Image (cartoon, helix red, strand yellow):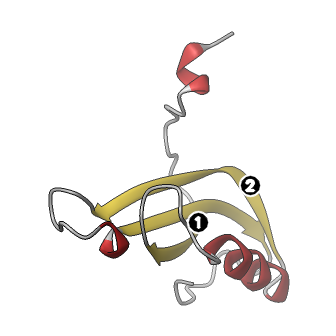
Amino acid sequence: MNLMSVYGNFTKKAGEYLVGYSRGYYGDAGDVAERMRIYADENALRLIGPVFTMFLHEEICTKDPSQYLGQYSVAVAGKRAARNGPDV
């Protein structure tokens, strides 16, 4: 077993990504996954995991965990993937 994959240490390759944002404590992504799925379905995009998570605002930036800002991105493929669209 590759321990790197167990801990989520993946390399984010170049390509087209669907990106969503959510405020809240670590692990509390709210409805961002559902919004991303709906957007992908409506735009004929196929989601290709894994999902990459990065916190843009966290305990270093703010004392209030409800204000942490998470960015979630997943690679996409499909006929509309080459077009630039809005972030979700």
Residue 84 screen position, x and y as percent: 55, 85
Asked whether 48 or 24 is in front, the reply is 24
* Residue 41 x, y percent position in the rendering: 84, 81
Residue 6: horizontal and vertical position, in percent? 61, 24
In the displayed structure, does residue 52 sit left or right of residue 69?
Answer: right
Residue lying at 54% horizontally and 34% vertically, measured from the top left: 8
Q: Residue at x 53, y 90 (%)?
A: 86
Q: Which residue is mark 1?
A: 16
Between 33 and 2, which is closer to the camera in this rendering? 33
Residue 33 located left or right of residue 4: right
> Looking at the rendering, which quadrant does residue 34 occupy?
bottom right
- Asked which secondary structure carries label 2, the reply is strand
Q: Are marks 1 and 2 in contact (CB under 8 Å)?
A: no
Residue 60 screen position, x and y as percent: 15, 56
Q: Is residue 19 left or right of residue 61?
A: right
Provide the secondary structure element on which disc 1 rests.
Answer: loop
Does 18 appear above or below 6? below
Q: Which residue is mark 2?
A: 48
Q: CA distance from mark 1 to mark 2?
A: 10 Å
Report whether 43 appears left or right of 30.
right
User: In this orientation, which residue lies closer to the viewer: 79 or 27?
Assistant: 27
The amino acid marked with disc number 1 is: Glu
**Quadrant housing the C terminus:** bottom right
Image: 63 above or below 51: below
Residue that appears at 44% across and 66% down: 71
Count of number-bearing discs: 2
Q: In the picture shown, does residue 83 fall above or below 63?
A: below
Disc 2 marks a residue whose amino acid type is Ile
